[in-house]
Amino acid sequence: MQLGAFSISLPVKDLDASCDFYTRLGFEQVGGDFAQNYLILRNGQATIGLFQGMFDTTLLTFNPGWAQDMSPLDQFDSVRTIQQNLRDAGIEPDLGTAPDGTGPGHIVVTDPDGNQILIDQHV
């Protein structure tokens, strides 16, 4: 099962302050929108998302359909295929997506220690 590009999604209180901090650490903005309260930053192969007011906890995030450099993949396991594979393995998503849909969708699972994992397909 291929989960796609990996990043950490961080809830932040002040998007401007957080962007300034991570920029000083060497990250550069590669996506997102201040007006929509989120930014995507990269430093080499490390990708982080800064999200103001969208969720309360840090999320491990995977993006099916994207390579680590955020370029689209021609072939990939869709979020719906991943959801079915997880169910077949005995892992029920906390939040699922319509199994018969197409295109963008997302699911959330929680590991045994309470860490949330977002699988978020944009393509």
Image (spheres, rainbow, N blue to C red):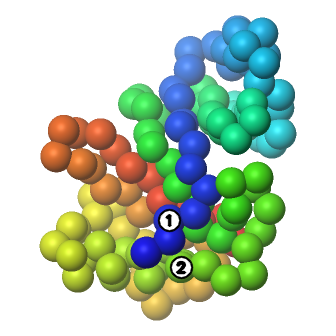
62 or 18: nearer the eye?
A: 62
Disc 1 target residue: 3
The residue shown at (70%, 41%) is: 45
Residue 39, image quadrant:
top right
- Is disc 2 surrounded by few (<14), some (14 to 19) or many (20+) residues within 10 Å? some
Q: How many marks?
A: 2
The residue shown at (78%, 9%) is: 24
Q: Is residue 114 above or below residue 77?
A: above
80 or 35: nearer the eye?
A: 80
* Residue 66: numbered disc: none
Image marks 1 and 2: residues in contact by CB distance under 8 Å: yes
* Residue 77: numbered disc: 2
Q: Disc 1 marks which amino acid?
A: Leu
Q: Inspect this view and state whether residue 49 appears.
A: yes
Expressed as whole percent of the image width and height from the top left, the position of residue 37 reads: 69, 31
Q: Earlier in the sequence, mark 1 or mark 2?
A: 1
Answer with left or right where residue 74 lies relative to residue 76. right
Dot 1: element: loop
Q: Name the quarter where the C terminus is drawn.
A: bottom right
